[in-house]
Amino acid sequence: MKLLVTGGAGYVGSVCAARMVESGHEVVVVDDLSTGHIDAVPDGCRLVQADLADVADPLLAEGFDGVLHFAAKSLVAESMADPAKYWAGNVLASVRLLDAVQRHGTPRLVFSSTAAVYGEPDQVPIPESAPTRPTSTYGATKLAIDHAITSYATAHGFAAVSLRYFNVAGAHGRFGERHTTETHLIPIVLQVALGQRDEVKIYGTDWPTEDGTCVRDYIHVTDLADAHLLALEHAVPGEHRIYNLGNGTGFSVRQVVDTCREVTGHPIPATVAGRRPGDPATLVAASERAQADLGWKPERPTLETMVTDAWTFARLTPRVRRSSD
Ligand code: UDP
């Protein structure tokens, strides 16, 4: 298939683009490189460095078999401080993309959605039928795009799938996570092991969980990429299907830090800090729907594998600026 990957210079986008190329697909990446990295675009992909909203139409006019849509702003705190950046950058650009998909008859679209659309859950594991009450502007913009996709796919007959990721972790060879502003737990802990930070702060040890720290559902980025391949294959014309993607197992912040200590052999000093605003205690996915409909199963479910792959990648990658720098 000829595929357009928006945001293919970012973490999940670059891994998915690499996996698509490995699977024999022709891939064009569109990325404005505002947060992505040029060297994260896999060999063999054509890169169009541009604003998606500007080039979606002329690009799709070339004729594509599918779009994988990752391009987005994705920092929760930034989304609260600067909502315009999120409503324009995420929602308006996505609507331009949907207009182009419709106009040029692109048959399928897979969208990178997020567990952040659910907000504070009433039940865990979280099924796709759970109420969507995002607690951040970031989550609200992703949910708005999900709604827009439903409207466009049903009105215009293309096949659409939204994949709602839980906590993505690990790396796929030389493709991994390197945000300029790092807020995620595993990369931060590995920065401590690399000597780029003195310690990790644990945001709260008084949560209603087994060890008092927050529990999250970590999913290996390669497993996530494989779900995108399956979603492309199983997408149904005129339908917008939504799937949660996680392991269905939660790991606590303390378990993550301990695993990083084991994998890196570094003591990784940790101090207890207050709760981070907006953090729910436990987020775990019910992924049975993806398993049943797509035949998807996480092949790399252990924290050890995710941390080992992230650690291999972190040691390959030049130092990036810390959020506190
Ligand atoms: N966390 C932490 N210290 C950090 C970063 C994160 O204790 O320096 C915690 C955070 O409160 C959450 C979990 O680690 O409970 C995962 O956070 P992350 O930002 O990686 O992902 P999120 O679940 O917020 O999408």
Image: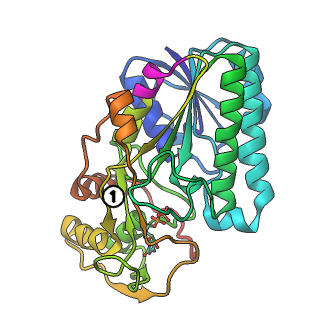
Query: Which three-letter amino acid code belongs to the residue tagged 1?
Result: Arg
Total count of labels: 1
Where residue 184 appears, x then y in whole percent?
A: 47, 64
According to the picture, the residue beneath numbered tag 1 turns out to be 315
- Asked which secondary structure carries label 1, the reply is helix
Give the magenta part as a residue range.
Answer: 229-236
Q: Is residue 160 left or right of residue 190?
A: right
- From the viewer's perspective, is residue 105 above or below residue 39? above
What residue is rendered at 72% in x and 14% in y? 104
Q: Is residue 299 left or right of residue 236?
A: left
Whether the magenta-drawn stretch holds residue 234 is answered as: yes
Viewer-proximal residue among 4 and 280: 280
Viewer-proximal residue among 158 and 192: 158
Q: Is residue 81 left or right of residue 115?
A: right
- From the viewer's perspective, is residue 229 above or below residue 60? below
Whether the magenta-drawn stretch holds residue 324 is answered as: no
- Tell whether circle 1 marks a residue whose Cβ is less than 8 angstroms from ligand 1: no
Where residue 157 appears, x then y in whole percent?
A: 65, 16
Residue 181 at least partly seen: yes
What residue is rendered at 52% in x and 19% in y? 236
Where residue 266 appears, x then y in whole percent?
A: 24, 75
Judge the density around disc 1: few (<14), some (14-19), many (≥20) Cα neighbours within 10 Å: few
**Ligand 1 sits in quadrant:** bottom left
User: From the image, which quarter does the C terminus lie in?
Assistant: bottom right
Q: Is residue 255 left or right of residue 239?
A: left
What residue is rendered at 38% in x and 56% in y? 125
Among the 4 quarters of the image, the one containing residue 189: bottom left
